[in-house]
Amino acid sequence: MSINPYLKFLGPEDHLQRAVFNYVYMAYPGVLIQHTPNEGRRTKFEQFKMKYLGTKRGTPDVLIFSPSKQFSGLAIELKVGYNKPTPDQKEWLKHLLKCNWHTVWHNTFDDCKLTIDNYFKNNL
């Protein structure tokens, strides 16, 4: 099996997100989970099309639409190292919180895993 040549273009946050998604797929099969592709560079046309179709800046990286007993959904903004959410990302988290979502931002896989487990075990 050959290694995908595009792997070299992925950054630390991409790998963190993949690990989080892999964990959810294995631990909670059937959960409705999504990533909105807001990051990356785009051509002027692609930027126009994303806005035209309704993509919003700051949408959290991990959106789990499967409800828990306490919340309508789970939104996780992923950061690596000492990075922090942007003002747009903070606004999304704040708005989703008002819509009965559990919202967090995390820098590590272990923190994400703990939050996801607690979300589905209703320990939040």
Image: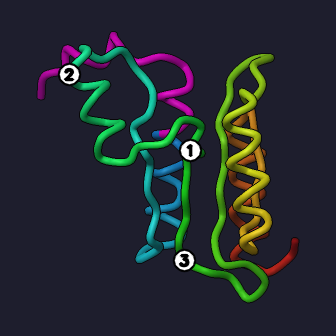
Q: Earlier in the sequence, mark 2 or mark 1?
A: 2
Question: Does 37 lie within the magenta span?
Answer: no
Which amino acid type is shown beneath numbered disc 2?
A: Phe
Image quarter in which the N terminus is found: top left
Residue at which label 3 appears: 66
Q: Position of residue 92 (x, y in %)?
A: 68, 48
The residue positioned 80% from the left and 17% from the top of the image is: 82
Element on which disc 3 rests: loop
90 and 26: which is toward the camera: 90
* Colour mapping used in the image: rainbow
Residue numbers of the magenta segment: 1-17
Q: Which of 45/67 is in front?
A: 45
Residue 39 shown left or right of residue 91 in the figure: left
Name the quadrant containing residue 49. top left
Label 2 CA crowd tier, 10 Å (few <14, some 14–19, many 20+): few
Within-10-Å neighbours for mark 3: few <14, some 14–19, many 20+: some
Q: Which mark is residue 45?
A: 2
Secondary structure beneath disc 2?
helix
